[in-house]
């Protein structure tokens, strides 16, 4: 709740000071930071989460996981640094539509190691289901990050806002270490970490899944934002960015539940009846809360526009499609985390690629006749189809498991 309200205040100041075109640039930099969270650690977050949850009482296996993770993060960070630093002009033009922000790209390149460290340590926090520490880390880091953003925004406008986002991972790592370093030392024996990859094959599966779910997702968003800039202008791109930012602010409630609870819980479930019971519990707990919250947001949409997204009146028609789409998305993601929990790589990649292809294709199809609203409608249609496909694949997985168990039961 603190994060939500602080986030609304930051959005208000951003939209008021940098305008719609500046807000589009902020959205592009956030896409880049999300991409780097996956690339710099070679996408091992969910793998670390899964194996820490499974082996938290098995120190030798944990050391193998952490050694592999250490190698992956070094490789990912070095490659990313060189690409970003020496390609700064290109990436500035791609993300911000001008080479004048190349210095921001170079700052991000220098911060790359902190991005990878923060991502890996967060995986450990989530794998241990350390709820209280997670809450403290998130709360303190978010408040300090918000203060930094506001100070730099007031002093340097759009340049300050972009710089704050770029250096935020340093602050997040410092907060995480301050709060969680004692627990980390209990599970990671830093002196025994070696330059070996005994879990290379297992973690590469999560690399593939992370590349699909994080890197491609953000590149599709960037492409759609660039498409809106080309066809309609930066202001319209900023309006869509504001809508997706609002979505991210309220969807953050579900993010912690997936990583702290759903994945560790699903990892230990092998029977369909237990899975359905757990999904039913999650649905009964989460969906009514989200439904009430989304209805409030919808009926208060004009107030949100007036007090949070100043002068973004064109957002109003987007709310209904975005909110319904996010509700279906929440239902889908609960089921889809079974793919991560059971390392069902092919199913995960197939459904993510299907979702992205639908979003990309439908957005380009709808935007000519509906403008920005067409992109948000594509978001809804994509998740309705995604939900049906994910439900079918999860159902098929448990049916296969049952058929494989029947012969052994008959022999017994």
Image (cartoon, rainbow, N blue to C red):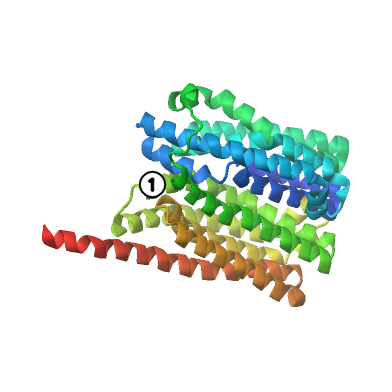
Percent across and percent down for residue 150 are: 78, 36
Apparent side of residue 53 relative to residue 301 in the rendered image (left or right): left
Residue annotated with mark 1: 265
How crowded pointer 1 is (Cα within 10 Å; few <14, some 14-19, many 20+) is rated as some
Q: Quadrant of residue 102?
A: top right
Q: In this rendering, is residue 269 above or below 398?
A: above
Which residue of the protein is positioned furthest toward the bottom in this rendering? 369
The answer to whether residue 17 of the structure is visible from this angle is no
Q: Residue at x 18, y 63 (%)?
A: 407
Percent across and percent down for residue 315 are: 75, 62
Q: Quadrant of residue 221?
A: bottom right
Residue nearer the viewer, 396 or 208: 208
- Element class at badge 1: helix
Q: Residue at x 49, y 27 (%)?
A: 184
Q: Residue at x 83, y 66 (%)?
A: 230
Quarter placement of the C terminus: bottom left
The answer to whether residue 330 of the structure is visible from this angle is yes
Q: Residue at x 53, y 53 (%)?
A: 208
Quarter placement of the N terminus: top right
């Amino acid at each position: 709740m603190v994060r939500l309200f602080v986030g609304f205040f930051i959005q208000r100041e951003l939209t008021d000071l940098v305008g719609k075109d500046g807000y589009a640039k902020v959205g592009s930099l956030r896409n880049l930071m999300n991409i780097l969270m996956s690339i710099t650690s070679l996408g091992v977050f969910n793998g670390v989460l899964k194996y820490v949850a499974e082996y938290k009482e098995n120190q030798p296996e944990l050391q193998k996981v952490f050694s592999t993770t250490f190698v992956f993060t070094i490789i990912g960070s070095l490659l990313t640094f060189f690409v970003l630093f020496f390609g700064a002009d290109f990436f500035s033009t791609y993300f911000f539509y001008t080479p004048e922000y190349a210095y921001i790209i170079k700052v991000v390149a220098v911060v790359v190691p902190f991005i990878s460290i923060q991502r890996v340590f967060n995986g450990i926090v989530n794998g241990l289901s350390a709820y209280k520490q997670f809450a403290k880390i998130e709360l303190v880091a978010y408040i300090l990050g918000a203060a930094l953003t506001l100070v730099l925004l007031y002093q340097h406008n759009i340049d300050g806002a972009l710089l704050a986002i770029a250096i935020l991972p340093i602050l997040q790592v410092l907060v995480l270490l301050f709060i969680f370093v004692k627990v980390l030392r209990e599970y990671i024996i830093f002196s025994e970490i070696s330059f070996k990859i005994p879990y290379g094959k297992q973690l590469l599966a999560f690399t593939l899944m992370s590349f699909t779910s994080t890197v491609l997702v953000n590149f599709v968003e960037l492409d759609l934002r660039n498409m809106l800039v080309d066809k309609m202008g930066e202001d319209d791109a900023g309006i869509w960015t504001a809508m997706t930012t609002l979505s991210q602010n309220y969807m953050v409630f579900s993010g912690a539940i997936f990583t702290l609870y759903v994945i560790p819980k699903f990892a230990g479930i092998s029977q369909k009846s237990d899975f359905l019971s757990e999904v039913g519990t999650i649905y009964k707990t989460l969906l009514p809360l989200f439904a009430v919250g989304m209805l409030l947001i919808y009926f208060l949409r004009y107030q949100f526009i007036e007090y949070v997204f100043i002068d973004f009146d064109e957002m109003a028609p987007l709310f209904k499609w975005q909110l319904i789409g996010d509700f279906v998305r929440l239902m889908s993601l609960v089921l889809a985390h079974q793919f991560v929990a059971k390392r069902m790589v092919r199913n995960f990649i197939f459904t993510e690629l299907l979702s992205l292809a639908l979003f990309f294709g439908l957005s380009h199809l709808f935007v000519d006749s509906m403008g920005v609203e067409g992109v948000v409608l594509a978001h809804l249609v994509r998740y309705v189809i995604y939900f049906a496909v994910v439900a079918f694949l999860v159902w098929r997985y448990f049916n296969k498991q049952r058929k494989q168990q029947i012969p052994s039961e008959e022999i017994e």
